[in-house]
Amino acid sequence: MRSRHLHLRKIQFAADIIGIGSYRAAVKILIVEDDRTTRELYRRWFEKADYEVETASNGCDGIALAASWKPDGVLLDIILPDIDGFEVLTRIKAATPEVPVILCTWGFGADVVERALARGATRVLDKSGLKPRKLVGEFDSVIAISLAQREAA
């Protein structure tokens, strides 16, 4: 409960700073993850924090959902069964450059981070040891920044 309250306070604080009044109750997050267990775990974490969540189990569905559902942020796995996460990232950012995309994968090197950032990723996170508070907190931060940038434009 404390985590949800903190999440909503951070988002409302950002909304107050940029002068958009009351922030809508649900921020829309798209999760693109092929592993069903992981996908559903992330869904529960975000729903518990009052995010509105849609999921895709492959890259093509993720690209289509990003275009039709218009999420406020995307959590994207790199290793997907049809096209890799880097290509999904490239396509999502080409269509909606203002939407923050966080890549999340198992163990990676500096080359993966460089490649992801060069294609427009907001952040790259390691799945190993990832906790709900860390993942939701990352989205709280990037969504708040994204809102401020959209309002300033």
Image (cartoon, rainbow, N blue to C red):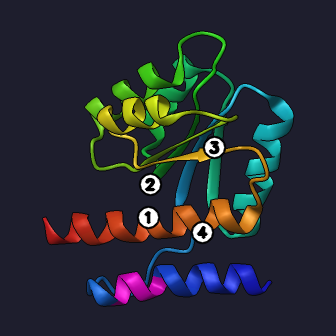
Three-letter residue code for mark 4: Gly
Real-space CA distance between mark 1 and mark 4, rounded to the nearest whole angstrom: 10 Å
Query: Along the polypeptide, which appears first: circle 4 or circle 2?
Result: 2
Q: Quadrant of the N terminus?
A: bottom right
- Judge depth for marks 2 and 1 and give the one in front: 1
Q: Are marks 4 and 2 in contact (CB under 8 Å)?
A: no
Of the image marks 1 and 3, the number of the one nearer the N terminus: 3
Q: Which label sits on residue 143?
A: 1
- Residue 9 sits in which quadrant? bottom right
Give SS at disc 3: strand
The answer for how far apart the CA atoms under marks 3 and 2 are is 11 Å
Residue at image mark 3: 54
Judge whether 139 appears above or below 114 on screen.
below
Q: Quadrant of residue 130?
A: bottom right
Q: Is residue 128 magenta?
A: no
- Kindly identify which numbered label has been placed on residue 72: 2
Q: Amino acid at mark 3?
A: Glu
Q: Are marks 1 and 4 in contact (CB under 8 Å)?
A: no
Task: Report the quarter where the C terminus lies.
Answer: bottom left
- The local crowd at label 3, few if under 14, some if 14 to 19, many if 20 or more residues have their Cα within 10 Å, is some
In terms of depth relative to the viewer, which is nearer, 83 or 51? Answer: 83
For marks 1 and 3, give the one nearer the viewer: 1
Q: Which residues are magenta?
A: 12-16
Dot 1 crowding, Cα within 10 Å, few <14, some 14–19, many 20+ = many
Left or right of 128 on screen, residue 71: left
Q: CA distance from mark 1 to mark 3?
A: 16 Å
- Left/right placement of residue 153 relative to residue 120 reads left
Q: Residue at x 76, y 87 (%)?
A: 2
Q: Which residue is mark 4?
A: 137
Main SS class of the magenta portion in the image? helix
